[in-house]
């Protein structure tokens, strides 16, 4: 199967490519990445020599490039390409709209024109909004209530994907995963940032009271779920992916400090960010 993986030099994308290749299945992979600040070709430098792997530098908003790539016999698309840092979306929302909405529409339309057999839109649990302490977990039928420009742009991309299935019968699947951690994550995210700061004896800036809750999943577990969805996912369906790993930000911070032998006095409470969702929790029973 020849597949186009967009955003494949980023955190989750590079782990997914590595997972597919190490799995030994017959995939021919084209990795399209714009190489913004969060993309790093060193993540996959050991794969450059492989005959079934090719890297192309480019933007999913470049319609002519997308048309050329999809015209080369691509059978599947997995779209990781996205602006994904919530804090940045508060100050540069236009960048998020361009990639996460316009770019998705261009990909969908060209993939449909070239009769791609499966399109996987990789999204986030943040599109559901925020939960209270006793609220049940998000399921796929929960209404969308995004609270940041980032999550709003991802929700828009999800709905575009849905519309291409409903209107044109195009075989789209949408996944929504909880917070990932693992190798190759850019150090603007909580775990790698705090590990780096602690090792350098810098303060660990915790928003608000630190009691915001996230459900954590290792990136390799996420990638295994995505491969299953690429192969077996039902067109038109949405699939939540979670790890049953609810932790407060403060718990994560204290765990990092304990493992590294650093004192809790390195925690620095800072003003909470606008629209900071209190809790995410995922019901992923559908995919089991």
Image (cartoon, helix red, strand yellow):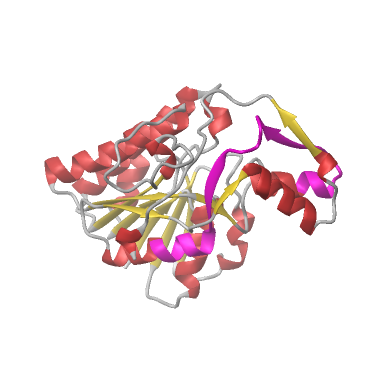
Q: Position of residue 152 (x, y in %)?
A: 39, 30
Q: Quadrant of residue 201?
A: top right
Question: At x 37% / y 75%, what residue is drawn?
Answer: 26
Check the picture and name the quadrant holding the N terminus: bottom left
Q: Is residue 74 something that shows in the picture?
A: no
Q: Is residue 83 left or right of residue 262?
A: left
Check the picture and name the quadrant holding the C terminus: bottom left
Q: Is residue 266 something that shows in the picture?
A: yes
Total numbered labels placed on residues in the image? 0
- Position of residue 146 relative to residue 46, above or below, is above
Which residue occupies the foreground of this view, 202 or 89?
Answer: 202
- Position of residue 160 relative to residue 88, above or below, is below
Question: At x 20% / y 39%, what residue is drawn?
Answer: 163
Q: Is residue 132 magenta?
A: no
Please state the extent of the stretch shown in magenta in the rendering.
196-225
Which residue occupies the foreground of this view, 63 or 261?
Answer: 261
Q: Is residue 220 magenta?
A: yes
Q: Position of residue 105 (x, y in %)?
A: 30, 36
**Farthest bottom residue in view:** 24
- Position of residue 63 relative to residue 3, above or below, is above
Which residue occupies the foreground of this view, 238 or 118?
Answer: 238
Q: Is residue 242 left or right of residue 116?
A: right
């Amino acid at each position: 199967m020849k597949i186009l993986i967009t955003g494949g030099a980023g955190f989750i994308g590079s782990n997914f490519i590595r997972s597919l290749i190490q799995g030994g299945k017959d995939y021919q992979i084209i990795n399209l990445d714009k190489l913004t600040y969060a993309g790093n070709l060193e993540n996959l430098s050991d794969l450059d020599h492989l005959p079934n792997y090719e890297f192309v530098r480019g933007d999913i908003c470049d319609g002519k490039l997308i048309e050329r790539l999809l015209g080369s016999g691509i059978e599947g698309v997995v779209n990781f390409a996205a602006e994904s840092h919530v804090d940045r979306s508060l100050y540069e929302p236009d960048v998020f709209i361009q990639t996460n909405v316009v770019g998705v529409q261009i990909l969908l339309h060209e993939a449909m024109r070239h009769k791609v057999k499966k399109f996987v839109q990789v999204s986030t649990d943040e599109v559901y909004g925020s939960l209270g302490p006793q609220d049940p977990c998000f399921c796929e039928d929960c209404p969308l209530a995004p609270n940041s420009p980032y999550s709003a742009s991802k929700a828009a991309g999800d709905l575009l994907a849905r519309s291409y299935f409903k209107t044109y019968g195009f075989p789209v699947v949408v996944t929504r995963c909880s917070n990932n951690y693992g190798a190759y994550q850019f150090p603007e995210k909580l775990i790698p940032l705090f590990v780096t700061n602690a090792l350098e004896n810098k303060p660990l800036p915790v928003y608000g009271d630190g009691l915001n809750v996230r459900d954590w999943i290792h990136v390799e577990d996420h990638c295994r779920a995505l491969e299953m969805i690429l192969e077996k996912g039902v067109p038109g369906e949405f699939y939540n992916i979670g790890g049953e790993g609810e932790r407060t930000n403060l718990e994560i911070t204290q765990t990092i400090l304990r493992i590294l032998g650093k004192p809790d006095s390195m925690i620095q409470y800072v003003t909470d960010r606008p629209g900071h969702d209190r809790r995410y929790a995922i019901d992923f029973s559908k995919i089991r």
